[in-house]
Amino acid sequence: MSGYLRDVDSVSALIATGRPLLLAGDAAALQRLPRGNWIGGSIPYFMSPAGTGSDRSAIYVNELPASVLEVSTSLVAPDDLHTFPSRGVDHGFTVIVLPYASEAQLRYAREAQGYPGLFDRPVVGWVAGRHLDDPASTLAVVVDGASGVASSSHAAVMHARLADGVTAAVDIINLFEQCDGDVLTFPETGFEASTVLVNGVEQPMATYLAAVGADPRVPLVADYLGAMINVAVRGADERGTVSFFAPVFAGVEYRIAAPIPEYIPAVRAEIERRGVHPAFACNCVLNYTYMHLDGEYVAGVGGPFTFGEIAYVQVTQTLVYLTIG
């Protein structure tokens, strides 16, 4: 199991030991913590040994292992995001946390794959969010523990140096696969689309989704050299413009995913097949809601349910994990 849930006082005592930590919790809880070697992001939904659920008073702790020799943390402005990969150490990994719907998150989702050096070392993280009962205007928060500064506009970044002979790796578990249906391509990159090319023929996007009876809980999926990458559909507005939780990219071929009948047995089987023992993991809050995971136990993997997951680039409806060994 990666990490554990603790109350604010317990986490404060742990921070005082100087151990490097990744912390997820409600914004109010995170901002009560002392300064130290940690970064965090707001989200009150968790996978834990007690099952999944929400808890505004608890904080999910990922305590990085002793093979992490040194960490540095900072807040990075949206205009400077392209520089963060070059600041990482040669033998290590980077964790980034982005506030949902901020300029930093939107730019990262659209632009990160073009950042110089992004793929030179493992990059993992999550998109901070809010309780789903809170108003949509509630801002997500990230915190740089070293300075104690919280932000709803910047990214929180941790660069970690590893001991010799130890390596880190980022991987995903995405149970969605492309169905055998229409090939969808988009004329422009972005978080919205009013039209789509369906097998090369332009159609209104909202009209197409309605005509095929698309399940809004099922994402679009692109095949990137065998890696299935999801784009979750957010909904359509009164103008017929369809919005997404991650950007679609111009020219990339998407298909609507095949539905997953039983998420928990399938994800458990995949975790066991891989023998996953992560140092950090997160899962998408859309999986939590759409797959009715409240109270369920995702065997062997714990962590926050997030508003987006980072495995180098931003993904959605995906379980992301970091292994160190």
Image (spheres, grey):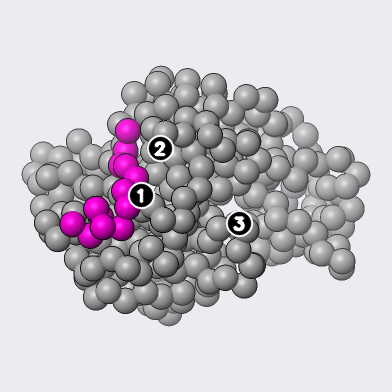
**Residue 132: image tag:** 3
Q: Which residue is mark 1?
A: 60
Badge 2 vs badge 3, beta-carbon distance below 8 Å: no
Label 2 neighbour load within 10 Å: few <14, some 14-19, many 20+: many
Q: Which residue is mark 2?
A: 48
Q: Whole-percent x and y of residue 282?
A: 43, 45
Segment tinted magenta in the rendering: 1-13
Callout 2, which amino acid? Answer: Ser
| Residue 106 appears in view | no
Badge 1 vs badge 2, beta-carbon distance below 8 Å: yes
Mark 1: which secondary structure? Answer: strand
Distance between the Cα atoms at labels 1 and 3? Answer: 18 Å
Residue drawn at (55%, 58%) of the image: 131
Taking depth in this image into account, of 223 and 77 the one nearest to the observer is 77
Callout 3, which amino acid? Answer: Leu
Mark 3: which secondary structure? Answer: loop
Callout 1, which amino acid? Answer: Tyr
Residue drawn at (62%, 24%) of the image: 262
Distance between the Cα atoms at labels 2 and 3? Answer: 19 Å
Quadrant location, the C terminus: top left
Which quadrant of the figure has residue 97? bottom left
Query: Is residue 8 on the magenta stretch?
Result: yes
Q: Which is more N-terminal, label 2 or label 1?
A: 2
Mark 2: which secondary structure? Answer: loop
Residue drawn at (39%, 32%) of the image: 49
Quadrant location, the N terminus: top left
Query: Is residue 91 on the magenta stretch?
Result: no
